Amino acid sequence: MGAIFRRELGSFFTSSIAYVFLGVFYLLSGWFFYSNTIAYGSSDMAGFFSMLFLVIVMLVPILTMKTFSEEKKQKTDQGLLTAPISLGAMVMGKYFAVLVMYIFGISIVLVHGVILSFFGTVDWTIVLSNYAALFLMGAACISIGMLISALTENQIVAAVVGMLALLLVYMLDLIAELIDNLISVDFITDALMAISFYNKYYEFTCGIFNLSSVLFYISVAVIFNFLTVRIFEKRRWS
């Protein structure tokens, strides 16, 4: 797993993906930090963290699009399937490489917190709670993006479908609200709200650390990584 992790992490920097992801993420996070916090002379970063959800939805698929689709296109996936490691180790090696790359991106919010501390009092408990929320939500989104990448050999398709899937996840609470207003079916509304990513993320932006939300994100990451392993198990024996 370690060799795959190092190989995958290094591939981000030998291609343009790392620089595109980090550059765009830092640019957008800087803009939202200024427009939602600095411009108002406030130390409240709740609005800033709320906007980062959409940024992550759009950028995470850029990180995950090549994890498996490129291997499949170049026919190098056969080498992975026959390598003397378990499929679980192969998937998790790539997963942790993407996760580390993602951490490089979201850690900029801690820099924003330090900058803000020069101008006012920063509630670091809330900042760290939101950072944890970004990490957990990103971990879940990455697992979804990697599953989609495993299903296609085209990076662009993997990125676009990944963005659409995460956008759907982003809009689940809005869909639930729309259904409730139109037909008022409680069990459908409750089910959608129960799996809403944004609803759980928003709790963290308000300073509410809910253990059930933490377990939800971890469960999503575990389930989708398991499904990715199953895809390769089927491919190995087909």
Image (cartoon, helix red, strand yellow):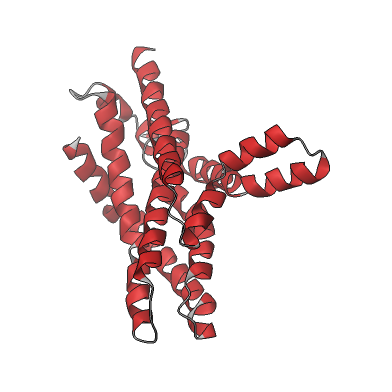
Residue 121: x %, y % from top left: 38, 81
Examine the image and state in which quarter residue 13 appears: bottom left
Residue at 27%, 31% in the rendered image: 90
Q: Position of residue 216 (x, y in %)?
A: 45, 40
Count how many numbered circles sit on residues in the image.
Answer: 0
- Name the outermost residue toward the top: 237
Image height check: is 30 above or below 170?
below
Could you tell whether 105 is left or right of 179 in the image? left
Q: Is residue 61 visible?
A: yes
Image position, residue 155 (x, y; %) = 45, 42
- In depth, the one of 226 and 200 nearer the eye is 200
**Which image quarter: residue 209?**
bottom left
Residue 71, quarter of the rendered image? top left
Image vertical order of residue 59 relative to residue 1, above or below? below
Question: Residue at 49% of width from left, 40% of height from top?
Answer: 158
Which quadrant would the C terminus be assigned to in this image?
top left
In front here: 178 or 235?
178
Give the percent coordinates (x, y) of residue 208.
46, 57
Q: Is residue 146 visible?
A: no
- Is residue 104 shown above or below 6? below
User: Measuring 58% from the left and 45% from the top, which residue is drawn there?
Assistant: 164
Seen from the viewer's position, the closer of residues 120 and 93 is: 120
118 left or right, relative to 60: left
Q: Quadrant of the N terminus?
A: top left
